Image (spheres, grey):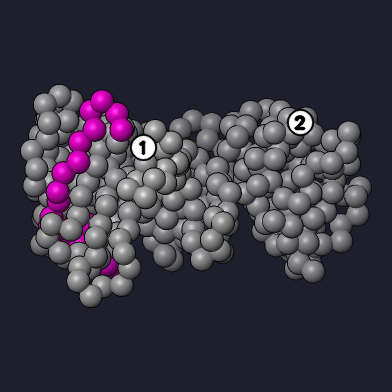
Amino acid sequence: MTELEGLDPIRAAEVMVRPSTGARGSGRRGSGYRVGPRWVLTAAHVVRDVEDGDTRVRFEADRADEWTARATLVLASDKADVALLEITDAPPPGPHSAPAAPPVYADLPDADVHLPCSALGFPRFKLRTDRMRTLDDGSPAQYRDSCHATGLTSVLSNRREGTLELAVTPPAADPDPARSPWEGMSGAAVWHGGTLVGLVSAHHRSDGLGRLAAVRVRRWYSLLSPGELATLHTHAGLPPAPDGLDRPAAPPGTPASPTLLAHLPSDLPLGELAGLAGALVALPTVARRTTLDLVLSGIDPSVAAMSPRSDSLRPDVFGILRTCLRYRGTLDQLLEAVRLLEGNSAGVARMDREAAALSRRHPGTGDGVT
């Protein structure tokens, strides 16, 4: 069976679930990925408490090749938060009926690096109003569009939980404080260098809006039973043992994980922030007010309120940095969001050097909060 390298958008699935009789909730959505002719990987918690006939998978919604099919649950592990669905309807003629080879599965190196990653799913914040269609009561219909989340994984984060931490561009907070804007992204396949390295499992609120957690493929081997691993090998193309996983090396020039600044005291004098402020002002993402607003929108509301208001950018950046120092972790969120939008550049390297120098001048002092 030939393996397929890389994310193929026509295989990204919306997983639509109607809970079984007596279960709580009216229904839920998740994401998944087609890994074989009749097989879709998703997160186990997406398909918890379902009965046969209560799950649908949809591909290429509202596009020329849209296809929706019924699916049955073949495997579900709460420990590993992975599930395998079997598609029970035949695909339509066209691209979906072509042979569906499994992906290449991989394990990332345990090293002090942050690596590019991506995932394609259908989160709640992508809910849109379709003004071309109406419901029976005359109100506009709604749909979820796709989200191609791209960012970095800090490989050494979340080691105890056994997940990958994905740093992505943050959406706005959901208007309902009880809901996460990332609802529905669970089950999306996470890719690095053309290999599948995990499945999105959770959005931990304490990590902020720009972080997702994904269960590593490597963890499946310690959390699944031999029978479950055999099922994934037979139907999803998972190597029978972890030594069969691809192990991509960190690309040449990959920077080490950035310096964290949550330990800085909240009352640093402006002179201590001058180097970092100067590096930020020189970056296009910060110099353009629209992109700076995007950066600030994914951080604590108290920081977002510092959106530039004066004609001179430099005083505003000083104000943003001083506000971040009063809210633990928000300075790290700010710099990470800038990195995601800027990419690897000389300007970002300068910013990271200034951040590292600032940390060395104030090693472990203060608590970073008021």
Residue 232 is situated, as x and y percent measured from the top left of the image, at 15, 52
Instruction: Residue at 62% x, 43% y: name it.
Output: 337
Q: Of all residues shown, which one is farthest toward the front?
A: 137
Residue 349 in view (yes/no): no
Is 29 drawn above or below residue 278 in the view shown?
Answer: below
For the record, the magenta segment spans 62-84
- The label nearer to you, 2 versus 1, is 1
Badge 1: residue crowd in 10 Å (few <14, some 14–19, many ≥20): few
Magenta run includes residue 204 = no
The type of residue carrying mark 2 is: Ala
Q: Quadrant of the C terminus?
A: bottom right
Q: Position of residue 161 (x, y in %)?
A: 42, 65
Q: Which residue is mark 2?
A: 287
Residue 66 belongs to the span the image colors magenta: yes
The residue under the point 24% across, 65% down is 19
Spot occupied by residue 16 in the image (x, y as percentages of width and height): 27, 52
Secondary structure of the residue carrying tag 1 is strand
- Per the image, the residue denoted by label 1 is 133
Residue 71 shows in the view: yes
The quadrant where residue 148 appears? top left
